[in-house]
Amino acid sequence: MNILVIGGTNFIGPPVIRHLINMGHEVTVFHRGKTQAELPEQVNHLLGDRRDLNDFKNKFEQLGLEVVLDMFAYTQDDAQKLMKTFKGIAQNVVAISSIDVYRVYDVLWGKESDIIPLPLTEDSPLRSSLYPFREIPYRPLNAPADYEKILVERVVMSDPELPGTIVRLPMVYGVNDPLRRLFPYLQRMKEQRPIIVLEESIAN
Ligand SMILES: NC(=O)c1ccc[n+]([C@@H]2O[C@H](COP(=O)([O-])OP(=O)(O)OC[C@H]3O[C@@H](n4cnc5c(N)ncnc54)[C@H](OP(=O)(O)O)[C@@H]3O)[C@@H](O)[C@H]2O)c1
């Protein structure tokens, strides 16, 4: 298949792209050129800012796309621009979402107190309040205040002309994780400390 990946050059993107290439797909990556990754040489690069996605419509048309994989839609506006741009150009849009859409995420942070059956399924309840990062001063990965994957999902799944697919990722760790989520634990294990003390907020 002919696939356009929006983003794809930072953390989760590169292994996904390598996998797509190994499966025999043709891949073009659209990003600003601020982050670089070692990607297979047959990957095409198209440089631009997703805020101006519509300006690249002619270029996208020439690619003969089948699928657009959006690795980096954070806001409702991102998703609306995505669907508007690729209507009539691609046959399917896949957007990467997050488990932070689930209500258990707010239970975890003490904002909700429901008992929610586990394991989570696609039908598990979603957060009732929007914009999970709006209140916090330090937003992970410089996410904008209007970061909201629930709205991204709604927009991508509600277009009558362009079918969408959502992939809700769990917390992901691994090589090049910009958040270094496991570092504090691994470092203390490496130092062979007998006890790993957690911050109270994390322990709770
Ligand atoms: N990490 C986790 O635990 C986790 C959990 C759940 C869901 N997710 C989701 O997983 C997805 C992938 O995250 P990732 O960090 O691994 O992404 P990635 O696709 O590896 O990297 C982010 C990409 O977006 C590009 N980009 C950023 N701003 C842009 C803009 N304005 N216009 C065009 N391109 C832009 C960056 O390239 P340039 O800088 O060159 O533009 C880079 O290629 C995200 O949607 C995230 O919400 C992550």
Image: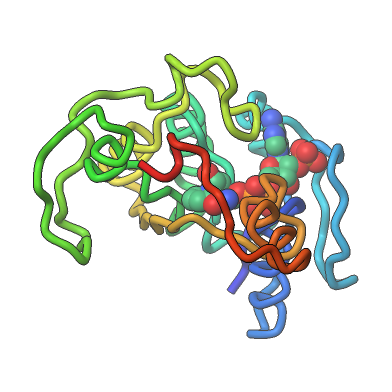
- Given residues 112 and 159, the one toward you in this image is 112
Residue drawn at (55%, 49%), measured in percent from left and top?
Answer: 197
Image side of residue 27 versus residue 128, left or right: right
Q: Is residue 82 above or below residue 135?
A: below
69 up-or-down from 60: above or below = below
| Quarter of the figure that contains the C terminus | top left
Q: Is residue 71 visible?
A: no
Residue shown at the point (54%, 55%) measured from the top left: 68
Q: In the visual, does 141 lie left or right of 80?
A: right
Q: Residue at x 63, y 58 (%)?
A: 185
Residue nearer the viewer, 177 or 93: 177
**Which of the 4 image quarters holds residue 119?**
bottom left
Q: Quadrant of ligand 1?
A: top right
Depth check: give the residue in front, 67 or 173. Answer: 173
Residue shown at the point (45%, 34%) measured from the top left: 79
Q: x, y (%) of residue 120?
A: 22, 61
